[in-house]
């Protein structure tokens, strides 16, 4: 696991609405735009092999969210039609200090890694007291049925709390701003509480619009 001192001050940015990378999770991506194919090739030439996932944000001064998560390229496959399939493994969240000018066709940003020591820890985070896992699974089942989603219930029931909460935060079809709020939660327990709230809100008919694939 990378330590804070190993993390670069500058890294390539991949803005993608509705896609967030949570701590200690993996994110598969299909890359086809020429500028992002170049980004992947450039990242593979560096020791860190990092790409920073970050969401667009219309109200920010640089058009990007303040908080993103950097992931290391842990696998890649080149396809015959000039696409690439890659997988990122989360390293750490970061605060975007500023977008940088460069000669690259893609964005780069200066990152502040302070405040995310838990992302770099070797052990999964745990949730706090008062967490009813069975109730959360039940709520998820009702949400999935209402949205017509398929779920691997065996994996949901046997995964640890961090895997369950973070994978749901990434995969469920919440709005981009809701996914961003989940990413920015300071602890796993805070993310679990927000996730529970979003599921309950949806079940009560709050936002019935599916926003991502």
Image (spheres, grey):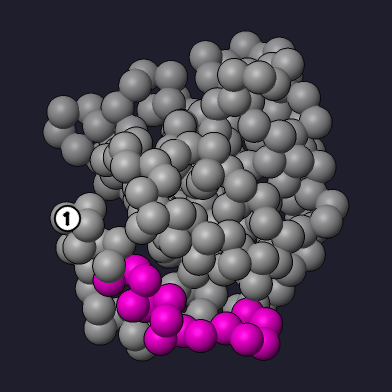
Q: Is residue 99 left or right of residue 39?
A: right
The reply to whether residue 120 is visible in this rendering is: no
Q: Helix, strand, or loop for circle 1?
A: loop
Q: Is residue 1 left or right of residue 110?
A: left
Position above or below: 178 against 149: above
Residue appearing at x 53%, y 75% in the figure: 162
**Residue 160 location (% of width, % of height):** 47, 83
**Residue 24 location (% of width, % of height):** 55, 66
Residue 1 sits in quarter? bottom right
Q: Which residue is mark 1?
A: 148
Which residue is nearer to you in this view: 182 or 117? 182
**Residue 40 location (% of width, % of height):** 45, 35
Range of magenta residues: 126-141
Position above or below: 9 against 157: above
Residue appearing at x 73%, y 16% in the figure: 61
Residue 98 sits in quarter? top right
Which residue is nearer to you in this view: 192 or 197? 197
Q: Residues within 10 Å of mark 1 (few under 14, many from 20)?
A: few
Residue appearing at x 73%, y 60% in the figure: 186
The reply to whether residue 63 is visible in this rendering is: yes
Residue 209 sits in quarter? top left
The magenta stretch spans residue 176: no
Q: Is residue 1 left or right of residue 18?
A: right
**Residue 194 location (% of width, % of height):** 58, 60
Residue appearing at x 16%, y 28% in the figure: 81
The magenta stretch spans residue 136: yes
């Amino acid at each position: 696991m990378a330590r804070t001192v190993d993390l670069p001050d500058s890294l390539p940015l991949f803005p993608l609405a509705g896609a967030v990378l949570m701590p200690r999770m993996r994110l598969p991506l299909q890359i086809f735009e020429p500028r992002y194919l170049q980004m992947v090739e450039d990242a593979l030439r560096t020791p860190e092999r990092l790409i920073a996932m970050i969401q667009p944000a219309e109200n920010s001064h640089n058009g990007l969210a303040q908080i993103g998560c950097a992931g290391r390229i842990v696998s890649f496959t080149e396809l015959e039609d000039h696409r690439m399939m890659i997988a990122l493994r989360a390293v750490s969240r970061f605060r975007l200090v500023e977008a940088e000018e460069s000669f690259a066709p893609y964005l780069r940003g200066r990152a502040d890694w302070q405040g995310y020591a838990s992302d770099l820890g070797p052990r999964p985070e745990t949730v706090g007291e008062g967490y009813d896992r069975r109730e959360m699974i039940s709520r998820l089942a009702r949400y999935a049925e209402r949205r017509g989603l398929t779920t691997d219930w065996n994996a949901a029931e046997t995964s640890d709390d961090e895997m369950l909460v973070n994978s749901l935060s990434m995969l469920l079809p919440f709005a981009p701003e809701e996914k961003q709020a989940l990413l920015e939660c300071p602890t796993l327990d805070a993310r679990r509480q927000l996730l529970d709230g979003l599921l309950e809100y949806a079940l009560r008919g709050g936002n019935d619009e599916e926003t991502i694939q």
